[in-house]
Image: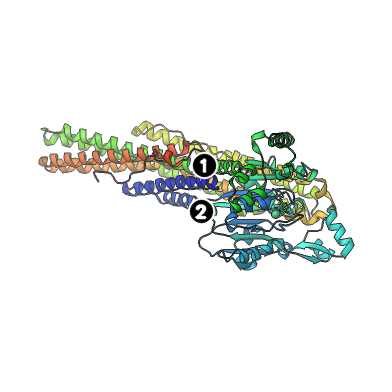
């Protein structure tokens, strides 16, 4: 029954494999044609690794007891013929839980003790520190053993009010918490802060990662989850329950964490089985469900087809009992379809925009180089052909002309070397400003503005300082980038006017992605600071954690800006450098061949054959490259959701070695 989702993901994996093959073929092509450079090779290797480790994250976010865990059980774990992840009425899942498959390790559940909240280490960092986690082996051959291990996800313990405050978990708006405190003099808190489950399910094997989260109260206490993990999920699934409708806290989760933060989202109206009343006709029940879907879509301001009515519980039961009619009625089939389309579409879009576009650009540059080599070889061929039947004097005259060309070229090369050095120096200075050391200084100033008392007011000030500094920095870097571009332009002009190189304008350095990303963080901070609950004094702990999460997000943004600026810097003079090398090789070849002919007129025919072979070989290399480029462009254009096995065959398979080589 799960075929819809499984098949889509398997086809996506196949598609990803084709892109990997194209990348490998291109690396081979660069090697064969001796046009690879270290940096480019490294980048291609990085991209291949990114593809290999690519993950699709689907996050389930909703108030407690809406059926997130039950839906995950129905979608992924029905083949254990029982309810595997714990779900019960009331608050059940106590900590965010990531479920994935890493083949390098045995199945496990790793649990991060809640006490780690006392320190400043972020989750991302803690994930790389296995010794801070408690690890339980998962015996996947035994459902009862699995169930027992997974029960840890619900563990709670009693602590004093002070300890709860110390951990930043006390919330006097939480009626349940206050009540327990009054009744027992203790506070119930989760034992674990985060859980990682390594589990060999076929879907997880293909790169899918599921994130199950606890309800509203627990969500707000872990800013890294709300600033980083949820907004970066490829699809966010929001659940509502038919029996409660859209409550105030449902709405708060939707507006605070999902509405404007998740790029792809689906809403599920769960527990529709509550409406399955034997006294009503199917048509009457369907109308009732449809009207609830319409109301929900209206309240969430979503198109009605992004709201699905399901019964997770009955879907799980139907799968276990192999009851097709019940499964059909549960609405789960539709969800699987939509989920598959959304997940695949999201990843398709991301990979097309990044890896495919970047590789296609590299290939286009290689194409130009190979065309230049081909043009040169053809000219050389014509030159040798024109010498047929001519005497030594004619050869000598040609040789003298080439020597003069070489001299002029060497003078230009000197200008290039000087310009290149100047650009390198300026580039180094520019990169330093985007370095993490510089960012640390900026963050320190922002921290000083935020102050020691960790109020939302301070946080707002700190963020404003950081934004202000980022804008000033981006402006400075833009000016430096323009100067580098101007210098590079002069060099391009020189080689165009004096040596007939292609007229080209180097690209501009664009700092808007950095600014846009930072402004998004500013918006998140504003929303956090406006939230009445966070303004209260008890939330200082949270403000501090929020600030730390902002720091790690800012680092990521700066690291990306650093990478972008670096590849821009490579692209400013890269094509000219390549052309210069090609031109030099051409002059050398021509001189060598003319000198051989000059020494012995009989060697003309041999030279002619050699160059003819070169032309044929280069033609074949160019054809192979065209084929590769076409395969990538077709892969990028393939519309999401139609990645059926039949369609993938029309993507040409890349060929590498030239037939004549
Ligand atoms: N009738 C009915 N009950 C359901 C359905 N889905 C879930 N439930 C029940 O609702 C309760 C809560 O389900 P969970 O899956 O634990 O909900 P959750 O959203 O994960 O809740 P937390 O883990 O507490 O955040 C459990 O008792 C489930 O059995 C459904 O489709 N129909
Ligand atoms: Mg749950």
The answer to whether residue 468 shows anywhere in this view is no
Label 1 within 8 A of ligand 1 by Cβ:
no
* Rendered location of residue 619, percent (x, y): 28, 38
- Spatial separation of the CA atoms under disc 2 and disc 1: 15 Å
Viewed as shown, does residue 532 lie left or right of 284? right
Query: Which residue occupies 13% across, 33% down?
Result: 388
Q: Nearer the viewer, residue 579 or 415?
A: 579
Q: Identify which residue, 2 or 193, lies in the foreground.
A: 2
Which of pointers 2 and 1 lies earlier in the amino acid sequence? Answer: 2
Give the image location of residue 158, x and y in percent: 80, 66
Image location of residue 359, percent across then percent down: 44, 43
Camera-side residue of 426 and 358: 358
User: In this view, which residue lies farthest toward the front?
Assistant: 279
Q: Position of residue 82 (x, y in %)?
A: 63, 58
Element on which disc 2 rests? loop
The reply to whether the C-beta atoms of the residues labelled 2 and 1 are less than 8 Å apart is no
Q: Which mark is residue 302?
A: none
Mark 2, other Cα within 10 Å: few <14 / some 14–19 / many ≥20: few
Badge 1: residue crowd in 10 Å (few <14, some 14–19, many ≥20): many
Is residue 267 rendered to the left or right of residue 351? right
Q: In this rendering, would 642 be left or right of 460? A: left
Rendering colour mode: rainbow
Disc sitting over residue 348 in the figure = 1
The mark tally for this picture is 2
Element assignment for label 1: helix
Residue 609 position (above or below residue 150): above
Work out whether residue 334 can be spotted. Answer: yes
Reading the image, the residue beneath label 2 is 53
Q: Residue at x 63, y 53 (%)?
A: 73
Query: Measured along the vertical axis of the image, is residue 187 above or below residue 492?
Result: below
Asked if ligand 2 lies within 8 A of label 2, the reply is: no
């Amino acid at each position: 029954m799960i075929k819809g989702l499984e098949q889509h993901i398997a086809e996506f994996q196949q598609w990803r494999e084709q892109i990997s093959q194209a990348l490998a073929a291109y690396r081979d092509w660069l090697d064969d044609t001796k046009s690879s450079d270290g940096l480019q090779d490294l980048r291609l290797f990085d991209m291949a690794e990114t593809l290999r480790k690519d993950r699709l994250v689907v996050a389930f976010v909703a108030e407690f007891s809406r059926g997130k865990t039950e839906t995950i059980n129905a979608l992924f774990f029905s083949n254990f013929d029982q309810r595997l992840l714990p779900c019960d009425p009331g608050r059940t899942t106590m900590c965010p839980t990531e479920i994935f498959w890493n083949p390098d390790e045995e199945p496990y559940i790793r649990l991060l003790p809640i006490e780690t909240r006392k320190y400043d280490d972020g989750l991302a960092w803690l994930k790389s520190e296995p010794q801070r986690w408690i690890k339980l082996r998962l015996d996947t051959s035994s459902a009862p053993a699995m169930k027992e291990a997974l029960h840890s996800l619900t563990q709670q313990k009693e602590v004093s009010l002070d300890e709860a405050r110390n951990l930043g978990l006390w919330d006097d708006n939480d009626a349940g918490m206050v009540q327990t405190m009054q009744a027992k003099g203790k506070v119930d808190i989760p034992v674990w802060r985060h859980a990682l489950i390594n589990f060999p399910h076929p879907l997880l094997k293909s790169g899918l990662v599921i994130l199950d989260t606890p309800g509203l109260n627990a969500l707000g206490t872990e800013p890294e989850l709300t600033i980083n993990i949820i907004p970066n999920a490829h699809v966010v699934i929001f659940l509502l329950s038919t029996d409660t409708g859209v409550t105030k806290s449902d709405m708060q989760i939707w507006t605070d964490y999902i509405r404007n933060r998740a790029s792809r989202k689906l809403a599920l109206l769960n527990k529709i089985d509550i409406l399955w009343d034997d006294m009503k006709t199917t048509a009457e029940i369907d109308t009732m469900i449809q009207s609830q879907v319409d109301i929900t879509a209206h309240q969430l301001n979503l198109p009605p087809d992004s709201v699905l009515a399901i019964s997770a519980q009955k879907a799980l039961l139907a799968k276990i009992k192999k009851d097709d009619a019940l499964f059909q009625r549960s609405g789960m089939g539709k969800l699987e379809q939509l989920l598959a389309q959304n997940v695949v579409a999201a990843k398709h879009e991301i990979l097309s925009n990044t890896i495919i576009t970047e590789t296609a650009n590299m290939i286009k540059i290689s194409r130009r180089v190979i065309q230049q080599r081909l043009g040169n070889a053809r000219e050389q061929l014509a030159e040798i052909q024109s010498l047929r039947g001519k005497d030594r004097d004619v050869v000598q005259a040609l040789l003298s002309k080439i020597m003069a060309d070489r001299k002029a070229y060497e003078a230009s090369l000197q200008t290039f070397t000087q310009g290149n050095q100047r650009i390198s120096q300026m580039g180094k200075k520019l990169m330093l400003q985007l370095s993490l050391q510089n960012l640390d200084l900026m963050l320190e100033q922002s921290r000083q503005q935020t102050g020691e008392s960790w109020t939302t007011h301070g946080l707002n000030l700190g963020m404003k300082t950081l934004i202000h500094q980022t804008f000033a920095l981006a402006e400075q870097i833009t000016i430096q980038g323009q100067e580098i571009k101007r210098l590079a332009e002069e060099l391009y002009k020189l080689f165009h006017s004096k040596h007939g190189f292609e007229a080209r304008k180097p690209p501009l350095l664009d700092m808007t992605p950095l600014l846009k990303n930072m402004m998004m963080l500013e918006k998140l901070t504003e929303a956090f600071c406006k939230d009445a609950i966070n303004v209260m004094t008890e939330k200082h702990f949270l403000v501090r954690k929020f600030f730390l999460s902002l720091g790690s997000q800012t680092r990521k943004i700066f690291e990306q800006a650093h990478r972008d600026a670096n590849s821009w810097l490579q692209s400013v003079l890269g094509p000219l450098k390549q052309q210069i090398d090609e031109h030099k090789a051409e002059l050398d070849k021509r001189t060598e061949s003319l000198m051989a002919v000059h020494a012995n007129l009989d060697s003309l025919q041999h030279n002619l054959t050699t160059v003819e072979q070169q032309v044929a070989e280069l033609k074949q290399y160019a054809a192979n490259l065209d084929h590769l480029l076409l395969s990538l462009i077709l892969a990028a254009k393939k519309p999401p959701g139609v990645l059926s096995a039949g369609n993938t065959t029309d993507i040409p398979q890349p060929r590498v070695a030239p037939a004549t080589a």
